Image (cartoon, rainbow, N blue to C red):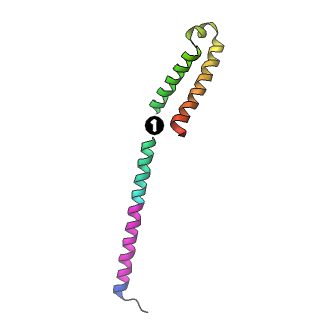
Amino acid sequence: MPCTEAYREHIMYTFNGYCKTVIRFAAINAWRDRSRRRQKEISLEYLTERLDTIMEQMKATEGVTEELKRTSQMEWVQCCNNIHNRAEEIVLHEMIYS
């Protein structure tokens, strides 16, 4: 069956319409993905403040004071490192992993 010029034109317009639809929906999906990522973003300053707050609360609860720092520096460093690691895990669990 020979293709007429009108049929070729019809095929071309149909294909162009299909391509425009695909590109349009790809752009919409990209925009939605970008919006979702922006909603989940957390500032580094907020994470740092949250870490400091948790560390101060843990220090107060466990009695890690400046007095301990003056009397037993190694024990104070061990306690602070332990508290820092635990607080970091809490922040990561609360803000990043969830």
Residue in view at x 60 percent, y 27 percent: 86
Quick check: 31 above or below 43? below
Q: Quadrant of residue 89?
A: top right
Which SS type dominates the magenta stretch?
Answer: helix
Quick check: 98 above or below 13? above
Residue in view at x 59 percent, y 16 percent: 62
- Residue type at mark 1: give it: Ile
Asked if residue 18 lies left or right of residue 76, the reply is left
Residue corresponding to mark 1: 42
Quick check: 28 above or below 80? below
Asked if residue 69 lies left or right of residue 15, the reply is right
Q: Quadrant of residue 45?
A: top left
Q: Nearer the viewer, residue 19 or 96?
A: 96
Q: Quadrant of residue 58?
A: top right
Magenta-colored span = 8-25
| Location of residue 47 in the rendering, given as x and y in whole percent from the top left corner | 48, 31
Q: Nearer the viewer, residue 6 or 67?
A: 67
Quick check: 35 above or below 16? above
Residue in view at x 37 percent, y 67 percent: 20
Q: Judging from the image, what secondary structure is the residue with disc 1 in?
A: loop
User: Can residue 50 be found in the magenta stretch?
Assistant: no
Q: Residues within 10 Å of mark 1 (few under 14, many from 20)?
A: few
